[in-house]
Image (tube, rainbow, N blue to C red):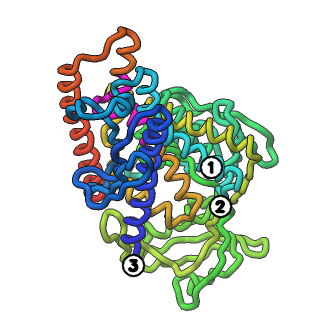
Amino acid sequence: MNFLQTVLAFVVCLGSLIIFHELGHYLVARWCGVKVLRFSVGMGKVVWSRRFGPDQTEWAVSALPLGGYVKMLDSREGDLGDLPPEDLKREFTRQNVWKRIAIVAAGPLANFLIAIVLFAGLYMHGVEEPTSKISVRASEPAMAGGAPTVAWSAGLRSGDVVTAVNEQPVAVWSELRWNLIQAAIDKKEARVAVERVGQGRFTFVLPADALATLDLEGDVPGKLGVGVGRPAPVVQEVIPGGPAARAGLLKGDLLLSVDDTPVGDGIAFIDIIRASAGKTVQVAVRRAGQQLVLPMVPQAEQAKTGKGTVTVGKISAYVEQQPDMITVPSSPIAAIGKSVARVWDTCTMTVKMIGKMITGEVSLKNVTGPITIADYAGQTARMGVASYLSFIAFISISLGVMNLLPIPVLDGGHLLYYSLEVLTGRSVPERFGEIAQRLGMGLLLTLMLLAVFNDVARLL
């Protein structure tokens, strides 16, 4: 069922974005008076088609689902000598350069517009997210040297509520994560403003050198020692006959420590228990104002993970884990403003990442392909409509940016040609364009192979 859901989520996501991208080209071409011969979803051989409209445009579905195209009347694709004069006026290359620029740019701009609409709708509706309350891990795992985490060394502590990062307001976890990633990409320090219950407001600095060396793949805040803030670890249920029940643990007990290691939340407690299979641990709890120490032995069980089957400890008890959540709806005007800013920030971050990959500052492992996209599409679809729509918006932005790269065969390559035509007053020589197309296709295929290789490596 999960596999089918993943495939469906991927097809809906990519298929809808391809259609909107090509509709951008199509609508602006029609507006500029260019005759459109075919609108295809997919590449390669046409497997289904119908003709509609005054120009009898062919609307088609093609065999290869990764892509699409709009075929316009174009003298570069054949002899048009037999066409009537009124049709020749609607040929693409006979249009002035500004019309051609508008037609080519319309596809990526449609992707950005869809992302703005999706984000604006989510902001107006309000998305339930974890608040900016954080948990802070004191030290790295023993396998990583056991050194204090960056966040702990800077002075951040569990229970702090982050209000701003580098003077950018923060209200929810996604905004905190976003600002930390941007600071890491820019290789600058992150000034984190927090409110600490009963103590006031403070600002702590995560140093630039620590952020600059981060691997930006995965959980960036986690690599700094920062996690979502969760409530105190109170026992919600104890299953009769399990290790917890035999040790005397009761519903309502507040968990304090395991073997003198403090546990700030339920996740920290679970992590320690999972790593203690078959070992006797001393669990300190507070019950009715008194502190007790309960010896218990987590039962060893086999569990499947992304790295295979591992042995974990379980005590048959449930602990509070749900973080504090907040829903903040915005007015239509505020939502549009926030969505435009979000799209702009995502575009600039994507361009910076691409630039750092080219210069070698960021690993090429960050290049992802259809397998990873499908995996995330399935995951977000299972998380809910809001998460899935946010994912579609992000992919739409990524498609828009990638298509604007100055690579021949992409929209950005054609825009580069037309920009040179504006500057020089003459079009790019046909022979030069043919060579550039071949080089661009080779580069694009190389990137696709790299993306698929990275996808397979992640799976393995």
Indicate which label's residue lies in the foreground, 3 or 2: 2
Above/below status of 361 relative to 458: above
Instruction: Determine which of the numbered discs, if any, sits on residue 65 in the image.
Output: none
Whether tag 3 and tag 1 are in contact, CB under 8 A, the answer is: no
Distance CA(mark 3)–CA(mark 2): 27 Å
- Disc with the residue nearer the chain's start (3 vs 2): 3
- What main secondary structure does the magenta stretch of the protein show? helix
Q: Is 105 in front, or is 90?
A: 90
Q: Is residue 318 visible?
A: yes
- The residue indicated by pointer 1 is 173
Q: Is residue 133 visible?
A: no
Indicate which label's residue lies in the foreground, 3 or 1: 1
403 horizontally vs 319: left or right: left
Assess disc 2: are there few (<14), some (14-19) or many (≥20) residues with their C-alpha within 10 Å of its C-alpha.
some
Amino acid type at image mark 1: Trp
State which quarter of the image contains the C terminus: bottom left
Q: Residue at the location (24% across, 32% down)? A: 80
Q: Residue at the location (56% across, 81% down)? A: 244
Whether tag 1 and tag 2 are in contact, CB under 8 A, the answer is: yes
Q: Which residues are magenta?
A: 397-416
Amino acid type at image mark 3: Glu
- Disc with the residue nearer the chain's start (3 vs 1): 1
Element under disc 3: strand
Q: Position of residue 434 (x, y in %)?
A: 19, 26
Distance CA(mark 3)–CA(mark 1): 33 Å
- The residue indicated by pointer 3 is 301
311 horizontally vs 284: left or right: left
Amino acid type at image mark 2: Pro
